[in-house]
Image (cartoon, grey):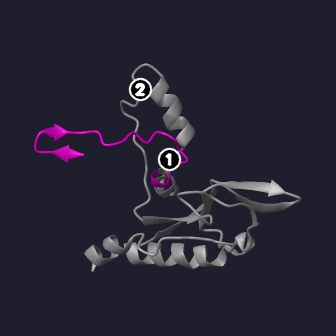
C-alpha cells in the first residue's frame, strides 16, 4: 500500500489459492508457466510482457455452514454442472466422496466471472454462484458493489 511515508506491506499473498489471485488469473492471457520460468532465469522478466484481458473480474466465495468460526464437511454440492463455460469455479474446500463433490472446509468454492464492466462481471458471478447449492451455503452479497457504484 502506498502511504505518505512510502510503500507499506500489509500482507503477503503468494499462494495461487487466495481469492484475490483467483480473481486475477482468469484475466491473464499470457502463458503463466512461461512467465514463471522466465522469472527464474538470469535476467528475469526483463523484456517479458504479460498480456491481460481488459475485462473486469469478480470472484465470489461460497462458504460452508459455520464459517469462519467453524465449518461443515460432507454436505453434497449440486449445480456445478450448470455453470456456464465462461465462468471459472475454483475448488478450495471440497472433496470427492462416493462419486459426488462434497464440502470439506470453510471456503468451499470461488466463482469468478469476467465482464466488460464491474456490473456485468458482478451480475455473472452472482448468477453462477446461485446455481451452486449445498446445506448451509453462505456468500457475501456485497462483493464488487463499490466498484459498480464508482463506475456509474
What residue is at 50 percent from the left and 47 percent from the top?
30
Residue 15, visible in the rendered structure: yes
Q: CA distance from mark 1 to mark 2?
A: 16 Å
- The residue at which mark 1 appears reads as 30
Residue 117, visible in the rendered structure: no
Along the horizontal axis of the image, is 82 left or right of 138? right
Along the horizontal axis of the image, is 11 left or right of 4? right
Foreground of the two, 29 or 77: 77
What residue is at 65 percent from the left and 69 percent from the top?
85
Where disc 1 sits, the SS reads loop
Where disc 2 sits, the SS reads loop
What is the quadrant of residue 39 in the picture? top left
Q: Residues within 10 Å of mark 2 (few under 14, many from 20)?
A: few
Q: Which residues are magenta?
A: 1-20
Are discs 1 and 2 less than 8 Å apart at CB?
no
What is the quadrant of residue 129 in the picture? bottom right
- The residue at which mark 2 appears reads as 44
The picture places residue 78, in percent across and down from the top left corner, at 74, 72
Foreground of the two, 98 or 32: 98
Foreground of the two, 92 or 43: 92
Amino acid at each position: 500500500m502506498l502511504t505518505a511515508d512510502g510503500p507499506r506491506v500489509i500482507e503477503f499473498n503468494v499462494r495461487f489459492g487466495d481469492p484475490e489471485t483467483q480473481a486475477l488469473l482468469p484475466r491473464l492471457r499470457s502463458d503463466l508457466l512461461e512467465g514463471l520460468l522466465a522469472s527464474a532465469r538470469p535476467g528475469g522478466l526483463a523484456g517479458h510482457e504479460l498480456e491481460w484481458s481488459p475485462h473486469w473480474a469478480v470472484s465470489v466465495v461460497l462458504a460452508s455452514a459455520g464459517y469462519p468460526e467453524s465449518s461443515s464437511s460432507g454436505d453434497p454440492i449440486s449445480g456445478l454442472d450448470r455453470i456456464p463455460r465462461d465462468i471459472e469455479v475454483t475448488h478450495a474446500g471440497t472433496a470427492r466422496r462416493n462419486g459426488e463433490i462434497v464440502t470439506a472446509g470453510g471456503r468451499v468454492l470461488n466463482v469468478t466471472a469476467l465482464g466488460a464492466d464491474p456490473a456485468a462481471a458482478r451480475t455473472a458471478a452472482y448468477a453462477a454462484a446461485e446455481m451452486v447449492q449445498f446445506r448451509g451455503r453462505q456468500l457475501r452479497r456485497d462483493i464488487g458493489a463499490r466498484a459498480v457504484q464508482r463506475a456509474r
